[in-house]
Image (spheres, helix red, strand yellow):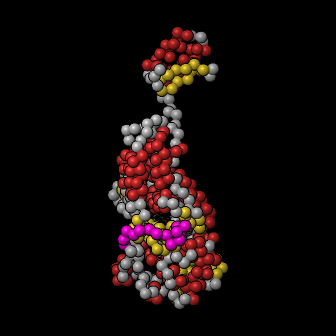
Amino acid sequence: MKIYNTLSRKIEEFKPMDQSEVKMYSCGPTVYGYAHIGNLRAYLFMDTLRRTLKYNGYTLKHVMNITDVGHLTSDADEGEDKMLKAAKKEKKDPFEIAEFYMDVFLKDIDKLNIDQPEIIARATKHIDIMEKYVQKIIENGYTYETENTIYFDTSKLDKYGVLSNRNVEEQKAGARVEFDSEKKNISDFALWIKAPENHLMKWDTFWGKCYPGWHLECSAMSYQYLGEQFDIHTGGIDHIPIHHENEIAQAQGFCGKIPAKFWMHVDFLTIDGGKMSKSLNNLYTLQDLADRGYEPLVYRMFNFTSNYRNKINFTWDTMDSSKVALSRLREGFLKHKNGTEMVESEILQDFENRFLEAINDDLNMPVAMSVVWEVVKYPKKSKQLMDLLVKFDQVLGFDLEYYEPKEEELPEEILELVRQRDEARQNKNWAESDRLRDMLMEKGYIVKDTKEGTEVKKGKI
Ligand code: AMP
Ligand code: ZN
């Protein structure tokens, strides 16, 4: 497998540190509101990576965090805590908010057929691990204290910013506000914060009643489950300049190592070429798509029209084409399922090779899908091709094998004729019953008399 590594800025051959198991960490959601479809793109990418690794025969130990504390409205140390802000707005306890939106999130990913990582780690359940982790960073001399905050001192590192490769001058230019005067360096960040009296999420710790900085949870929990170094770390491209740089800084302060060998980042979903935002009223959830008649797997199909490293632009037109594509895929699958022809083994092998080549080329799903379409449209209809699609579906995740076409709903006009015919038969009005049967047949329905009454289905005798 070849994957793009943000750390080296190159496509590299993937080799796990331990041949038998790939250790992977993904930055998960902050559970303070409904996930929008942009967020969900990040987890679809994560899922395609999981599935591709498995398709290549690897077993996985994959951790995803759930942020339920400490994430401020900006990734740097600015703004309010997202959880507390939502709690205030909804007049609920922040723990209740976290519980509710975590549940919605897990249901959403399930609807998209995103497999859950082996370990889902909630920040609030790992405060003790974070406390130990931060104490070691302090012991190692990478921090300084102000009245209310323990900061990471980024000037103690050989280099801060290995992932985004930005220097301090560029960071200063990029900073939106004059940086907090308490900090010694612009890139320093909060590790451990004293909770004000009225702060709702706080714990008794070595430094009094505190709560952790957002970046800490990912370092502490990845260390807890995967050790000092593991294979792959994933997230959105917005994580590169701050969150992941800070994770790397923390790990270097903790044990002197960059925690992951490979860093993979998914680019953003845009809407009509621009940003999604509440104020533009174009921030959609999976439920919004369902309300407009798009099942979740249509959104999955839509995501395969672009490589994860490119932006993808959401439009309703593209959703319509993805809807058609999903039903063509299912229809094509069923045709092969009912097929009786044989296909030469070289042809099957060629399809299989090209599919594998595409997914192993840094998860090139648009090319992988083009192979899928060749299989679907292959003129010979064959169970061998159905088996091949079932195999490919291990990566695609459409549950083709379990797809049952829904009984087509009968139009109201036909239902009315059926009702009239049943009434005629109850009244022993056989001439009327026959007339109605002929009308139904003319409209393309097969009519059958049963004890329960008239039964019709589409088709000709
Ligand atoms: P959050 O819950 O705000 O921490 O975000 C969860 C994930 O969604 C992060 O990995 C972000 O990088 C990602 N994300 C946020 N907005 C978008 C977007 N428009 N397109 C793709 N990913 C996004
Ligand atoms: Zn993270």
User: Quick one: quadrant of the N terminus?
Assistant: bottom left
Q: Residue at x 52, y 87 (%)?
A: 143
Q: Is residue 108 visible?
A: no
- Which residue sits at x=55%, y=23%? 455
Give the mark count.
Answer: 0
Is residue 447 shown above or below 399?
above
**Residue 72, placed above or below residue 343:** below
Q: Position of residue 216 (x, y in %)?
A: 54, 76
Q: Going 37% across and 68% down the picture, which residue do you hit?
A: 11
Q: Is residue 135 above or below residue 390?
A: below
Q: Residue furthest right?
A: 204
| Residue 21 forms part of the magenta stretch | yes
Instruction: Name the foreground residue: 354 vs 110.
Output: 354
147 relative to 370 in the view: left or right? right
Question: Residue 168, percent across and down?
Answer: 37, 83
Q: Is residue 348 visible?
A: yes
In the image, farthest residue toward the front: 345
Query: Where residue 423 appears, x then y in whole percent?
Result: 58, 17
Quick one: 349 or 266, which is closer to the camera?
Answer: 349
Q: Quadrant of residue 180?
A: bottom left
- Please give the range of residues in magenta: 9-23
User: Residue 102: where, in percent of width, then height?
Assistant: 58, 61
Is 31 magenta? The answer is no
Horizontal placement of 98 versus 13: left or right? right
Q: Choose between 455 and 373: the one closer to the eye.
A: 373
